[in-house]
Amino acid sequence: MHPLVNPPRPDRRTFLRQAAATGLSLSPFIGSTRAAPSDRLVCAVIGVRGRGRSFYPALASRKDTTVAALCDVDANVLATALAAVEKVQGRAPKPVEDFRRLLDDKSIDAVFVCTPHHWHGPIALAALQAGKHVYLEKPASHVYREGALLVRATARYRKVLQHGTQMRSSEVTARARDLLRSGVIGEVKMAKAWNVQRHSHRKPVPDHPVPKGVNYDLWLGPAPKRPFNPNRFHGNWQWYRDYGNGDIGNDGAHDIDMACMGLGVDRLPVRITAHGSRIALEGEREYPDNMMVAYQFDNDKVLLYEDRGFAPYGMDGVDSGNAFYGTKGYMSFSRRGYFQVYLDRKGTKGPGMKGDTGNERHLQNFLDAVRGSARPNADARTAHLSCALVHLGEVAYRVGRVLNFDPKTEMVRDDKEANAMLTKEYRKPWELPRDL
């Protein structure tokens, strides 16, 4: 069994390298990876519902990857996934209930972490420590501290981490970024991200017996011990703080990430304000269904996030999108795969483009990075910069006041309550490494 243990203390040279890596103003980590011992990268997928279903068929159908194992705490969904891979690959992967078994397997090169959010950080950190490359679904962290640890862990263990923000690899994003940097709309001073879509929520139900074939204690993992309830399980856990991050950490994580890209920020914010409430009162959830967050950076750039989970319509024709405001014009951008530039007061159209949403390119970029021929487009530092905004926005909403954040110490100034929310308690034996 591979425990979540503290790694050995580094020597002086390693320590200095890590110290540099933890400074978020430095250049992104470039992984020094080794190629797989064969032509095929040996992969495992952890969590086969939801996003996991996007990876095991794709990996099984490739000539340069092998799905050696599938891992899930629910034997019922695991059986279906195993059969699907065997049909494509010609042989069934190994079924695994406890992800730690995968980390003991030295033949596995890379793991794809597609679990509920509360498991993202702990599994990714353990996998990096075990010498695995990691494709980590968004958000990379359930709380702020986990993201900072991931930055340090990738530097220490020299492994690739790719965050599942697929538009980082889209040709649409690349073209939009080049145009913004060229000054087509002038200097970009403000960015807006929005997620506008109607969600329905389940009515409260009594606790139930644990379904047959489910290792519920392992599903809870670091989360507090509590009875099984179907509302907090498959397909609905994201609305509860013990396991998910609500709208801002679900679809919002993608849109905030793209806002950071377009705004060109490579730093953490210094001032955060948030407002929110419940408008649609039916159903059970622990997050607001409308939210507005403003982030100010030390170069006076501003990023705005808007969430309307009660609305049966989008904004500017899309449910999830961005707008980048410059001194000469603005760009409307959607992670659904297109952008359009508007110039002058008349709204004259400038350059525009439609294309893919980056899924296949993002996977290819990860595999290339593992082989050492590319850099990951969404590495741990990029992931932390974006996910930090998710967590800081949620903290600002919960405490109901302005957060004055210090990017150097990664703490809120003079706010003990807010700082406590940057991390959380982990149920034993799932505590995180202490000396990263």
Image (cartoon, rainbow, N blue to C red):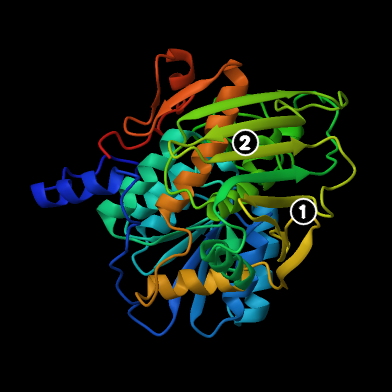
Q: Is residue 204 visible?
A: yes
The residue lying at 40 percent from left, 74 percent from top is: 374
Binning the other alpha carbons within 10 Å of mark 2 as few (below 14), some (14 to 19) or many (20 upward) gives many
User: Alpha-carbon distance for marks 1 and 2?
Assistant: 39 Å
Instruction: Please say if 124 is above or below 365.
Output: above
The residue lying at 70 percent from left, 25 percent from top is: 286
Judging depth in this view, the residue of 80 and 190 nearest the camera is 190
The residue lying at 59 percent from left, 70 percent from top is: 175
Judging depth in this view, the residue of 326 and 417 nearest the camera is 326
Residue 234 locus on image (x, y percent) = 72, 43
Residue 225 locus on image (x, y percent) = 56, 25
Q: Is residue 74 visible?
A: no
Q: Secondary structure at mark 1?
A: loop
* Residue type at the position of mark 2: Asn
Judging depth in this view, the residue of 8 and 252 nearest the camera is 252
Q: Nearer the viewer, mark 1 or mark 2?
A: 1
On screen, residue 74 versus residue 196, left or right, reads: left
On screen, residue 188 versus residue 330, left or right, reads: left
In the picture of the structure, the residue carrying the numbered disc 2 is 245
Instruction: Please say if 121 is above or below 187.
Output: above
In the picture of the structure, the residue carrying the numbered disc 1 is 345
Instruction: Please say if 314 is above or below 167.
Output: above
